[in-house]
Image (cartoon, grey):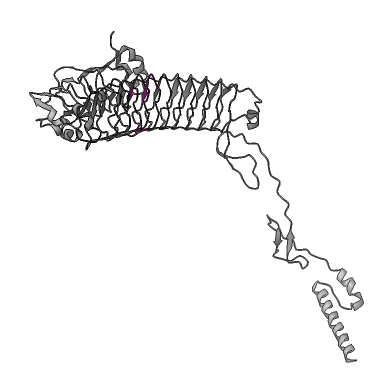
Amino acid sequence: MSKLIENLNLIESYKLDIKSAIESKGVDMTNVSFPDYPAAIASISTAFVTETLSVTVNGTYYPSAGVDGFSEVSVNVPAPVPVTESLNVSVNGTYYPGLGYDGFNEVVVDVPQSVTGYTEKEITERRMNIVNLNNSASFVSHFAFYRYPDIETVSLSNCESVGESAFCSCGKLTTVNMPVCITVNNNAFISCPSLTTVSLPLCINISYAAFSGCFLLQSVDISECTIINGQGFRSCSSLEHISLPKCVQLEAGAFQDCKTLQSIDLPECRNINSSVFLNCYALSTVNLPKCSHISARTFENCSSLEHISIPMVESMDGFSTFRNTVISTVSLPRCEYLGGQVFAYCSLLSEIYVGMEAYGVPSISNNVFSYTPIASGTGSIYVRSDLYDQYIVANNWSVYASQIVSVPVSTSLLSFSNGALTGDTAYIKENIYSVLTIPSRYAILTVSLPECRSLYTKVFDNCQMLSEVSLPTCEYIDDFAFRNFGRSAASDIEITLPVCSYIGKAAFNQANKLTKLTLGSNSVCQLAKDTAAFYGSPVSIYVPASLYDAYLADAAWAFWSPQIFPIPE
């Protein structure tokens, strides 16, 4: 019975709670009995709470005010619909679409422009006839036009790199022009038998066999190139001349079998590897003013090579470096080592000047001079007088003891009297005032050095009274050698250099009385590529008529072309 009473009391309590809740909603519950409570509840007007939720991704959100007792909302955010817009792009950069995509209003584009305008499928399946390739490609991919049968010209103004074998064996290709190309990769133009002209003025690297087998190639502009890798121009049998003013290294076989190559300019080259000029039958003169190392077979079978200027070479450690050339005289002032058969079969080699600036006796192999006049006992080896006794007993030198001739060092060979500098020195290494006691730079009036082959930096710098110069055998005139000379001379000055093969930077700078310079030799004298060599000098430069056009075409001499004249026949 007590339990029943307890439940009845609980029911009455619930009725009171419900009545209070209904009254809280503004309903008058006076005289409303319990059976009428549902009708009272129905009369309550429901007010919904509205709240804007900021949602970007799927998840559970918690409104600040509940809705009908709900305190959380699960949201399923519909995926955004991307805005598609076609961008007209041709080069790398940042582009700004007219319509944004999810808030993005710019696109950074890396454009893979192998061959703009053509798909790889179109090229590889030969679906079009490309004769003149001319567009905005930034690179040409590997094998892009491998053995392409129709292409004749390539002119890519924005191309910076040519891929491996990109134009290999393009039989009709005649002309290549890429003004900003930096790198040409392996075999890029190998075996293009019709290619005649290549212009790559900014290219710094020619890779392995890049132009090998281009038999008709005649004109090459790679003036910024610093390295030519192995066989880069091998068997370019129509190439007669090439200028490489910034090249520092030639790798193995770079110009091997270029049978018509007559001359090459290499003012900065430091290292020449094996077989670089092997079988270049027409090569007659080579000037290498800064080269320190020459490897095996570099000039082997250069059967027209008569003159080589290598004043800085320290080592020729390979085999047969000059084998079968027609060099008659060679000077190796700094050489420290000569390898096997370096001069073998040089049938005219009768004079060699060696070690004039070396610290000791160079090491040589036992067959350096095989089958030369020196080996047969009719040639001469000229060495420094202070090292003569060491040469005649030195290993592999002693067999030539009867042919070794002592040459006094430069100071003892020079004399100065009554304004005249004379002597039989083979070279002057330093400013003249450091090797002779001369009252002042104004004291020297004439110079006569019939045996001198090399004048080094600043030798006659500021000799302002010097008015007569005789250097009939001088081959090498270094930087600033005659700068400011003769400025106070009583009359105009003329100089003849019959065999000079190199003139350095500012060599005759500000020589305002120098009016005539005559150059001989059978090849273009190499001129350091600067605009100060004759600056301030009113000189007229006379060259052999047969070389006149070559001087005008030379990159360094062209600056002075208004002052260059052919020697009258």
Image position of 57 (left or right of 13): left
Q: Residue furthest right?
A: 35
Q: Residue furthest left?
A: 418
Give the answer, above or below, for where 391 lies relative to 80.
Answer: above
Classify residue 353 by image quadrant. Answer: top left
Examine the structure image and report whether residue 276 is included in the region drawn in magenta: yes
Q: Picture coordinates of residue 20 (x, y %)? A: 81, 77
Magenta span: 260-288
Q: How many marks?
A: 0
Q: Quadrant of the C terminus?
A: top left
**Magenta stretch: dominant SS?**
loop
In front here: 256 or 400? 400
Q: Residue furthest top?
A: 569
Classify residue 284 by image quadrant. Answer: top left
Q: Picture coordinates of residue 371 (x, y %)? A: 30, 24
Image position of 468 (left or right of 269): left
Q: Picture coordinates of residue 197 (x, y %)? A: 48, 21
Q: Quadrant of the N terminus?
A: bottom right
Give the answer, above or below, for where 549 lies relative to 90.
Answer: above
Examine the structure image and report whether residue 324 is included in the region drawn in magenta: no
Image position of 118 (left or right of 534): right
Q: Is residue 187 visible?
A: yes
In front here: 129 or 230? 230
Q: Residue furthest bottom?
A: 1
Q: Picture coordinates of residue 112 (x, y %)? A: 58, 36
Q: Is residue 475 visible?
A: no
